[in-house]
Amino acid sequence: MTVVIAAIATHTIPVIGERAAFLLFFFAIIQTAFWLGLNPGILAMILSLIVVNTLVLSPTSIGTYDVLILNTAFYLSSAFMIATTNFHRRSTAALQETRQDLDYAQTVGQIGSWRLNVQSNELRWSSQNHRIFGIPEGTPLTFETFLSSVHPDDREYVDRMWQAALRGEPYDIEHRLIVAGEVKWVREKAVLEFQTT
């Protein structure tokens, strides 16, 4: 479909047919390979070569040698784009699978994970951490959001221990949470990473 759209645009819009046909077909090939995979990407490349030769190169007075050079360059560029796009698709799928495994393991183990950027005060939680704290995913999180979930009698202790951790002391504490009106006990550990610039 993307090749058909590129062919129609190349044929009906003169400025594309004259100057940007190759770019349009490259875009069609990338989109096909990205969304549909390796084999559809290769098919899009072959169809694009046929259309480019029929609609763009044949009507011109380009010599056979130049046509061969353009076809070779188009083929090699397209093959490279398809290969890199396919690698990206496989890497993304593997990453998603690993993420699902981690989420499942955290759910079974009732363990959450979190990451706090102290400079921007941006807190990111795993799905299980959201469930533990009873805060819906997508809720903007900060250190203060976390602290507001802590039992009021434990907040000062948790904050004091966190400030000590920022000075280099270990952060391995137990405290209470208030989740949906109920008290829960949690254990928290943190490994702080300090960036040196």
Image (cartoon, grey):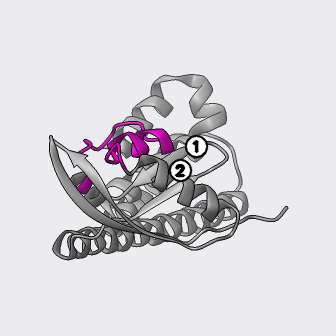
Name the secondary structure under disc 2.
helix
Question: In this rendering, would 137 be left or right of 107?
Answer: right
User: Residue shown at 63%/42% (left/top)?
Assistant: 120
In the rendered image, residue 154, in percent from the top left (x then y), is placed at: 38, 51
Compare marks 1 and 2 and give the one earlier in the sequence.
Answer: 2
Instruction: Examine the image and state in which quarter residue 21 appears.
Output: top right
Task: Name above or below for residue 59 compared with residue 107.
Answer: above
Instruction: Say which of 119 and 34 sits in front.
Output: 119
As for residue 138 lying within the magenta part, the answer is yes
Question: In this rendering, would 100 be left or right of 141?
Answer: left
**Alpha carbon of mark 1 to alpha carbon of mark 2: how far?**
42 Å
User: Residue shown at 28%/56% (left/top)?
Assistant: 127
Most extreme residue toward the front is 153
Instruction: Say which of 62 and 4 sits in front.
Output: 4
Task: Name above or below for residue 82 compared with residue 56.
Answer: below
From where the camera sits, is residue 47 visible? no
Nearer the camera: disc 1 or disc 2: 1
Instruction: Examine the image and state in which quarter residue 129 appears.
Output: bottom left
Quick one: quadrant of the C terminus? bottom right
User: Residue shown at 62%/55% (left/top)?
Assistant: 163
From where the camera sits, is residue 77 visible? yes
Three-letter residue code for mark 1 = Asn
Instruction: Say which of 60 and 78 sits in front.
Output: 78
In the rendered image, residue 43, in percent from the top left (x then y), is placed at: 35, 62
Task: Name above or below for residue 168 compared with residue 9.
Answer: below
Residue at the disc numbered 1: 121
Crowd tier of the residue under label 1, counting other residues whose Cα lies within 10 Å: few below 14, some 14–19, many 20 or above = few
Residue at the disc numbered 2: 26
